[in-house]
Image: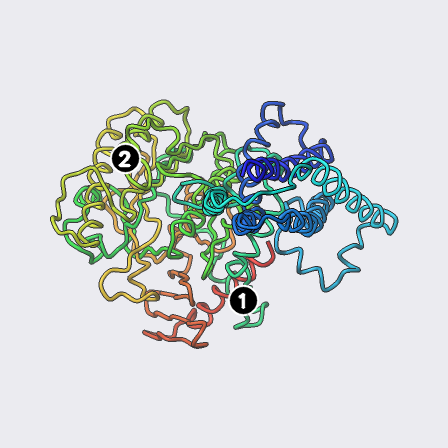
Amino acid sequence: MKQRLYFYLKYFFFWLVIEALFRLIFLITYHDLGREINLPDKLLIFWKGLKMDLSLTGYILVIPTLAIAITSFIKKNFIRYFTYWYTLIILIPLVLLYMTNLVAYRYWSFPIDKNIFDYLSTPAEMTASLETGKFILLLFICAVLVFIFWYVFYKKWVASRFINLKFSPASFFIFLFLCIFLGLPIRGGLSISPLSTGTVYFHKNEFANHAAVNPVWNLVYTLSEGERFDFDLQLLPDEEVQTILTELNPDTPGERSVLRTDRPNIVIIILESFGGLVIEELGGEPGLTPKLSQFIPDGLFFTNFYANGTLTDKGISGILSGIHALPRSCIILYEKKSQTLPFISQDLIKKGYNTMFLYGGNVNFAHFKSYLIMGGFQKIISEEDFPGSVNICKWGVPDEYVFQKLLDECNRATEPFFHACLTLSSHSPFDVPMEPVYPGNSMVDKFYNSLYYTDKHLGEFLDRASQQDWWDNTLIILISDHGNRLGNVTEHDRSRFHIPMLWLGGALSQKGQVIEHYGTQSDLPKTILGQLGLPSDYYPFGKNILNPATPSYASYSFHNGGGFVTDTSYFVYHFPAGKFIVEEGVQDSYGKKACQAFLQGVFMDFNKR
């Protein structure tokens, strides 16, 4: 058994060393891109990337670990020969992929992913950038590396004493346990969210993040998640789609100014699951959010506002990047595409704003961290920045502590500042540190309690914030990340996407007004920038809601289609049905084609990034 364990330990480090070695080769090859990265951060690249390396090693070790367990009852050295050839079989594609990434990065500027297979049908074009001599040299280097790793390092060092194995029933149970334990590094730890490409992002320099990514792991990941990233939809001619979207998102004069200054502090509070179905003023359940109701007369309340999609990641990308939600996926799950997005945070940084994003949970969840880093947020605060004593719910830090942190950050921030905060207590399983206001034990009762809890501490934050010096020059925007499905609401029903948006703060010049103009999360960047007198024509799917000249509509996406709502009509297109499943109201100038144009336009935009 000792021989088996000794071999296994060396075999484990054998793969880790290879992965670290290729990361070192990558850094040396592109040393010019990393000149601005200091030595401690370069070392941190290896530390951050270790999580992916461990995951890839875990995948590689599953089969040999199981094989060692099964052959514990066999005296012959079958396992030695098995691992000998298994190692070669794995090394060949592994080395080829690492070397491919080394070459491809110069052209892609991103670690290889499943898109590499798009070029396999045209190998001539795939290798066109390489001269014949260099291509042959590259294959020769791959062959040499495979030989060195396999024959020299593996055979001469790892497996040198893996002989004369004895019958060992105990090793069967040990290696069976190790096989099960491999699920931990494969998944990336015990965190709620599994390992994703964005988990290793840590630096403002994009090259540092790319160097931390294990390209082979990234390829496997994007292949396994490929269904979420492959989209092709043809409902209208592409030219017609572009024409319709241009008409729906015009850059026409007619701004309605609602601010006393063109450089206010801006605080966006993104409220988890605060959909219209739980907001009394939008026709939802009475009394769930009394503090929000209390502040409505003090601000601008948008009553016909909609979420672009169904999940938090889609809501955030709409709110911060003005991007419309994709059915079945979200662009921020794919770093190569999301790094091409516009960001209101970047726009504001150019105007001297200090930026911060606050979230009480795991910021790696759903690629939030990489997305926020690409958005240029100068400070990102997550559960790791709170004392462990307050991290008492499953998703992270309860909202009362998050709101206190937000107040502290605003108090110490240099003006003008742009802060965004995402709450989490009203996310399932709704475990909040508060005596239940709704005594039932159903999921709905727990959800209602969590909403009441967040609303209570939101109110306390607003009360205390209004007493601070910075309040008079601040715009507070309360907005939900997405709506709800309560009762018999279908996946496509408009009520599922109806959400509140409330503007508050001392920077407002107009208060106590209701805005009935239809809008969505992706309209927010253009609307804010319009109030600041800044350009915003590079946001492809948004409009300025406070410009009376813009059309009044809201578009949203769900897994199998999308909806389009105007003052007089409502349409829902369903992909599997291949038709509109909802047609209500007047067929106005937008109508069905606008619904189709948005859906197809989202796919077109995604595929070209």
| Near-viewer residue (366 or 63) | 63
Instruction: Tell me: 56 left or right of 560.
Output: right
Q: Which structural element holds mark 1?
A: helix
* 558 to 526, vertically: above or below: below
Compared to 403, does 143 lie above or below? Answer: below
Residue plotted at (88% across, 48% down):
133
Determine which residue is flagged by label 2: 392
- Whether residue 340 appears in this view of the structure is no
Q: Which quarter of the picture shows residue 548? A: bottom left
Residue 250 position, x and y percent, is 49, 57
In front of the other: 205 or 306: 205
| Crowd around label 2: few <14 · some 14–19 · many ≥20 (10 Å) | few
Horizontal relation, residue 168 to residue 528: left or right: right
Q: Nearer the viewer, mark 1 or mark 2?
A: 2
Q: Position of residue 561 (x, y in %)?
A: 43, 67
The residue beneath circle 1 is: 241
Q: Are marks 1 and 2 in contact (CB under 8 Å)?
A: no
| Neighbourhood count class around disc 1 (C-alpha, 10 Å): few under 14, some 14–19, many 20 upward | many
Residue 206 figure quarter: top right
The answer to whether any part of residue 201 appears in the image is yes
Position of residue 306 in the picture relative to residue 25 (left or right): left
- Number of residue marks: 2
In what element is the residue under mark 2? loop
Q: Quadrant of the N terminus?
A: top right
Residue 253 in percent (x, y) is at 46, 51
Q: Residue at 54% x, 67% y: name it.
A: 241
Res. 396 mark: none
Earlier residue among tags 1 and 2: 1
Q: Residue 427's x, y, as percent?
A: 30, 47
Q: Residue at x 53, y 52 (%)?
A: 70
Amino acid carrying label 2: it is Ile
Looking at the picture, which amino acid does disc 1 mark?
Val
